Image: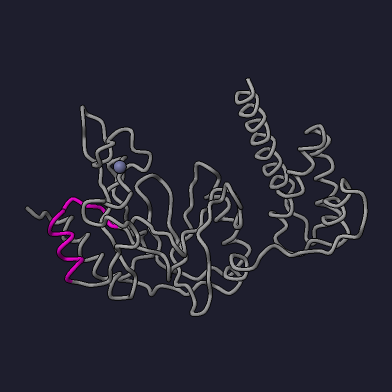
Amino acid sequence: MIDASSISVQSTALAFARHGHAVLPLTWPIRVNGRAVCSCRKAADCISGAKHPLGRLVPNGLLSASTDPAVIRRWFADEPQANLGVVTNRLVVLDVDPRHDGDSSLAALEHAHNFPPTWRVMTGGGGEHVIFKCPEGVEIASSQARDNPLLGPGIDIRARDGYIVAPPSRHLTANRYAWSVDHHPAEIPLAELPVWLAKRLASPPRQIDPPRLPQPYQNWLKLTREPVTEYADLACARFGGYLVRHLDPAVALDVLFWWNEHVCRPPLEASEVHRIWRRIVHRHAERIMAKEAHDA
Ligand SMILES: [Zn+2]
C-alpha cells in the first residue's frame, strides 16, 4: 500500500536525483509500546533513530545512494514508509541545532553577511537545514560544530561524504521534515554557496609564524600581536579555551574582555564574549569531570 506521503517522499527523491544529488532510503519511526523508536532492529537502542541508511535496501550505506530514477522508484515502492536521505557531496548544508545555540549563531551570520534566499527545511526535531549548492571546483568537508565550530556553536556542516534527511521524512518526534515557508524549491532556486561562506568553510585557519619564545607565550602572541579582523568569534573561542585551561575562569573572562576590546577590529559584543566564555567553562568542567570519572 502506498499512501500520499510516501508518494511525495519518492517524488522529492526523484527531484533531488534530477539535479544530480544521489538519494537513499533511510529508516523511519515506528511506535512500540506507545513510544516512537527506530524501525531498525535496534529499535529504542538505536543512536541514530529513524535517520540512518536502510541496510536491507542500501547495504553499503551512502555508497549505495543513487540518481537512477528506476532504482529510486524500486526502493520507495519496496519500502513506502522509508525516510529520504540526500547525499550532500555537491551541496553544503548548515545544520542548525537550537539546543546548542545554533539559532543565535545563524542569526549572527545573517546579520553580518550577505545571506541569499535559498532552500530551507525545518527538521522534525526543531532544527533547521539551510541548503546551498556547492560551487564547481570547491571542496567543503562535513564537520561537527563540537569538534571545530567554523560558523559558531550549534551549526554542523553537511557536505562531502555526508547526507541530510529531506522532506517529507518523519522524525522520531512524529513531526515531518518540512520546507520552510518562502524557502520552498517550488518558489525559489537553490542558491550557490556565497563566497564568504565558501572561504570560511574551505580555508584552514590562518597561520601566524610565531617567534622563538618559551612555549607558554606562543598562544598569547599568536592571538595578540596582530589585530583580529575576521572570525573574531572563532579566535575568541580558541583564545578563551587557552585561557580557561591555564587561569581561574573569572580572570580568564577579564582577559578575554580586554583582548576583545584591544585586539579585535571591530570588537565582538560583550554579551557574545560572555556567552563564548560560558560555553568554554562549561565544556572544560565537563572534560575534567569525565577525566576524573575515567581515572577513578
Ligand atoms: Zn536504527
Where does the C terminus fall, quadrant-wise? Answer: top right
Residue 168 visible in the shown view: no
Is 156 left, or right, of 251 in this rendering? left
Where 2 falls versus 117 (above or below)?
above
| Image quadrant assignment for residue 129 | bottom left
Residue 80 lies in the magenta-colored region? yes
Is 176 left, or right, of 264 in this rendering? left
| Image quadrant assignment for residue 181 | bottom left
Is 197 left, or right, of 68 in this rendering? right
Residue placed farthest to the right in the image?
A: 213
Q: Position of residue 75 (x, y in %)?
A: 18, 60
| Image quadrant assignment for residue 108 | bottom right
Q: Position of residue 168 (x, y in %)?
A: 26, 56
Where 7 falls versus 215 (above or below)?
below
Q: Which residues are magenta?
A: 70-84
Residue at 78 percent across and 56 percent down: it is 267
- Image quarter where ligand 1 lies: top left
**Majority secondary structure in the magenta region:** helix
Residue at 79 percent across and 39 percent down: it is 253
Of 121 and 241, nearer the camera is 241
Of 30 and 219, nearer the camera is 219
Residue placed farthest to the left in the image?
A: 1
Q: Position of residue 67 (x, y in %)?
A: 27, 71
Residue at 24 percent across and 38 percent down: it is 41
Q: Position of residue 289 (x, y in %)?
A: 64, 26
Residue at 15 percent across and 63 percent down: it is 74
